[in-house]
Amino acid sequence: MNKIFSIKDKVAVITGASGVLGGSLAKSFIEAGAKVVMLGRNHETLQSRVKELAGSEDNAFAVEANVMNIESLENASEKIIEKYGKIDILLNIAGGNIPSATLSPDQSFFDMNISGWDEVTALNINGTVYPSYVFGKIMTEQKSGSIVNISSMAAYSAITRVAGYSAAKSAITNFTQWLASDLALKFGDKVRVNAVAPGFFIGDQNRAILLNPDGSLTDRSKKVIAKTPMQRFGEVEELNGTVQFLCSDAASFITGALIPVDGGFSAFSGV
């Protein structure tokens, strides 16, 4: 592979690493030669994932931390620096929608569970801001680093039933642009911040909304496919290449960008 795309020996912190997307990225980064720090709240689950994906702690390291707690993240950063001496990459993968923040088809905004709104917005906004605050500071001290956030198709236009998630992901797009600008202006061109906006991928959080019990498409799924020019859902592995590119020297002049990985969903009006 062209060395400009390499992330070999870079230390990558991945939040939400025990999830489907985080796990896929961890596997991809390990295979690409990176040193992967898998961050999550359940240490036993993380240790199991390390053994499954890397076989040992030479190329992967499990660290228990809560992305919603600064002190927890600072403790994690000390452990990472003690082991590897640096942090080159932060992938803010922790987040997602939650059932209590999802409206049913016959509900309106005024039926929304406010505690669900509070939970989903805090998870998706603070769960990205806090790790960026802790690990991004280390990058500025090193004068180099790459942060990649996860936005959403919901940041492009309104998607029904998920008001809190939509608002939070729109905030992540704006925060990505803001932080990218602030870090470049104050700490130089080697500290970069970008985001990817996944299209529709079937995972644990949305399976019941997109698939019927027999595996057939729900009415919502049919609408998604109709607005996706590629006429299919994405495979989670199809995000890996874009994220790796953003973390490599091939993207050295890219910061503040939002890259859709969506089969054309964001480009197509549906007409």
Image: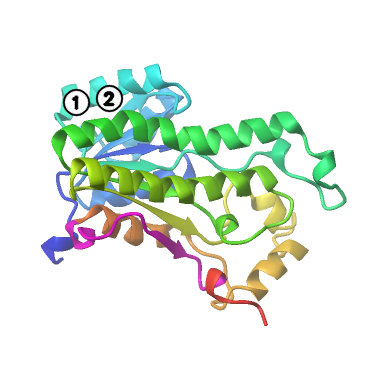
The residue lying at 62 percent from left, 49 percent from top is 166
Q: Is residue 186 left or right of residue 16?
A: left
* Crowd band around label 1 with a 10 angstrom C-alpha radius: few (<14), some (14–19), many (20+): few
Label for residue 81? 1
| Residue placed most toward the observer, 109 or 262 | 109
- Mark 2 and mark 1 residues within 8 Å of each other at the beta carbon: yes
The residue lying at 69 percent from left, 60 percent from top is 215
| Outermost residue, left side | 3
The residue lying at 20 percent from left, 58 percent from top is 252
Q: Residue 211: percent from the left, percent from the top?
A: 70, 58
Question: Residue 117 occupies which quadrant of the picture?
Answer: top right
Q: How is this picture coloured?
A: rainbow
SS for dot 2: helix
Q: Residue 216: percent from the left, percent from the top?
A: 72, 64
Residue type at mark 2 is Ser
Q: Residue 200: percent from the left, percent from the top?
A: 57, 61
The image quadrant where one finds the N terminus is bottom left
| Magenta segment boundaries in residue numbering | 249-265
| Residue placed most toward the observer, 58 or 139 | 139
Is residue 119 visible to the viewer in this orientation of the structure?
yes
| Residue placed most toward the observer, 73 or 174 | 174
| Residue placed most toward the observer, 9 or 158 | 158
Query: Relative to residue 95, is residue 105 depicted above or below?
Result: below
Query: Relative to residue 52, is residue 24 depicted above or below?
Result: below
The image quadrant where one finds the C terminus is bottom right
| Outermost residue, bottom side | 271
Q: Is residue 25 magenta?
A: no
Residue type at mark 1 is Ile
Query: Relative to residue 49, is residue 105 depicted above or below?
Result: below
Label for residue 77? 2
